[in-house]
Image (cartoon, rainbow, N blue to C red):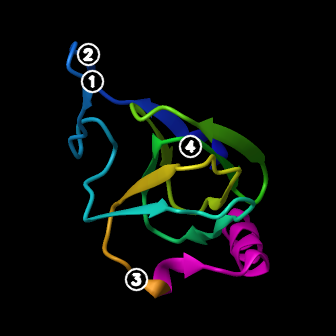
Amino acid sequence: MIKDCKIVELPKIDDPRGSLTFIEADRHIPFSFQRVYYLYDVPGGAERGGHAHKALHQLIIAMSGSFDIHLDDGLEKKTVHLNRSYYGLYVPPMIWREIDNFSSGSVCMVLASDYYDEADYYRNYGEFRDDVKKALD
């Protein structure tokens, strides 16, 4: 559900030489991660995402720059703006997401709870909505 999507404040250690943030699985985020990937060099006006996951948990972080994440659980929608590298957005399974409004030079890093599996994706919004409705019946 959309209410389960939440900002996670990560540890931030300030130092005159620069700041440091770290992430420990099952400690700072509510899952262990098996995969890390990142989006970068996204052209102006481009959108990423446009899918949901059946079982995958994710933490999305703006490592540099900023972007908007549009979340949809099939019933409610909300938009989250990420622009700090010590905040991550936890996205549980069954949340449709679209990412846009990338600033120049932005980097979006994602920690995922499992390895890539195409069978875990909803790439068709209608199919996603149908399965949400079925689960509610």
- Could you tell me residue 71's position as x and y percent? 68, 52
**Which dot marks residue 36?**
none
Q: Is residue 67 left or right of residue 65?
A: right
Residue at the (41%, 35%) spot, across then down: 85
Q: CA distance from mark 2 to mark 4?
A: 27 Å
Tell whether label 2 touches label 1 (CB within 8 Å).
yes
Q: CA distance from mark 1 to mark 2?
A: 4 Å
Q: CA distance from mark 4 to mark 3?
A: 22 Å
Query: Closer to the camera: disc 1 or disc 3?
Result: 1
Query: Closer to the camera: disc 2 or disc 4?
Result: 2
Q: Residues within 10 Å of mark 2 (few under 14, many from 20)?
A: few
Instruction: Please determine whether, in this image, residue 36 is positioned above or below residue 3.
Output: below
**Which dot marks residue 19?**
1
Which residue does the numbered mark 4 point to in the structure image? 5
Q: Is residue 94 left or right of residue 20?
A: right
Q: Amino acid at mark 3?
A: Asp
Which residue does the numbered mark 3 point to in the structure image? 117
Which residue does the numbered mark 2 point to in the structure image? 14
Residue at the (52%, 49%) spot, across then down: 106
Q: Does the stretch in magenta take in 131?
A: yes
Compare marks 1 and 3 and give the one earlier in the sequence. 1
